[in-house]
Amino acid sequence: MPRLILASKSPRRMELLSEAGIKYRVVPSHIEEVSDYKRPALIVRELAYKKALSVALKHPGAPVLGSDTLVYCKGEVMGKPAGHKDALRLLRLLNGSWQAVHTGVALVWLDKGIFLAGSEVARCKARKLSETELKSFASKHHDKAGAYAVQDKDDAFIEKIEGRYDTVVGLPMSLVRKFMKRAGAN
C-alpha cells in the first residue's frame, strides 16, 4: 500500500495525522489559492482539491490529501493575511465576534480513479481584545487563516468553539478517515 502524501507543509496538519497514527509523507502543493466561488464551503473544497490534484499528477500511484481553511465573518471571506496591516485589519473585524471556520479536504488517487472532496464548518467566538492586544496578535500568525492560531497555547483570541476543534485547526480527521476508508487507503 503506497504511503499517503500530504499536500501541505502545515505543522498543525502533520500533527493531527501523526496523532491519528496515519503514516504519511509531505509533498507541498504550490498552487495559486484563488477561486471563483463565493460560498466559503465551495472555496475550501475547490482549493483542497486543486492542492491534492497538483501533487497527485506528479505521484499518480499514491493517495494525496489536500486541505484548505478559511474564516468567514461579517460577509468577508478571510484566508491568510497579506502581512501585518492585513492581519490587524482581520483581527479588528473578528474582535469580539462569532465567525465560521471552513476547512475543505480532498483525497485524490489517480491510479485508482479516486476523487473525493468535502468540507466541515465550526463556529468560533473571539474574545474582545484591546487595540494593544490586537497589535500584538497581528505580528504572530501571518500563515494562518484569520490571522490567529487556536492551537497555540499563548493565543487566547478564541474563547469558544462550537463544532470540531480539528476543523478549526485545519484538518477535520473524521472526514480524512472517511475518505481514506472509501479509498481503501487505511
Image (spheres, helix red, strand yellow):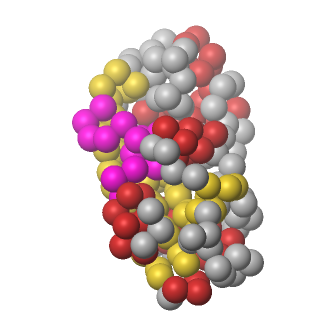
Q: Nearer the viewer, residue 169 or 138?
A: 169
Give yes or no for residue 178 being in the magenta stretch: no
- Taking 112 as reference, is 53 left or right? right
Across and down, in percent, residue 184 comes to 42, 72
Residue range (magenta): 161-175
Across and down, in percent, residue 50 comes to 59, 73
Does residue 161 appear in the picture of this structure? Answer: yes
Residue at 57 percent across and 70 percent down: it is: 1
Q: Quadrant of the C terminus?
A: bottom left
Q: How many marks?
A: 0
Q: Nearer the viewer, residue 121 or 11?
A: 11
Residue at 64 percent across and 45 percent down: it is: 10
User: As drawn, which residue projects farthest toward the front?
Assistant: 1
Residue 43 in the image: above or below residue 71? below
Does residue 131 appear in the picture of this structure? Answer: no
Residue 108 in the image: above or below residue 157? below
- Taking 26 as reference, is 42 left or right? left
- Taking 116 as reference, is 6 left or right? right
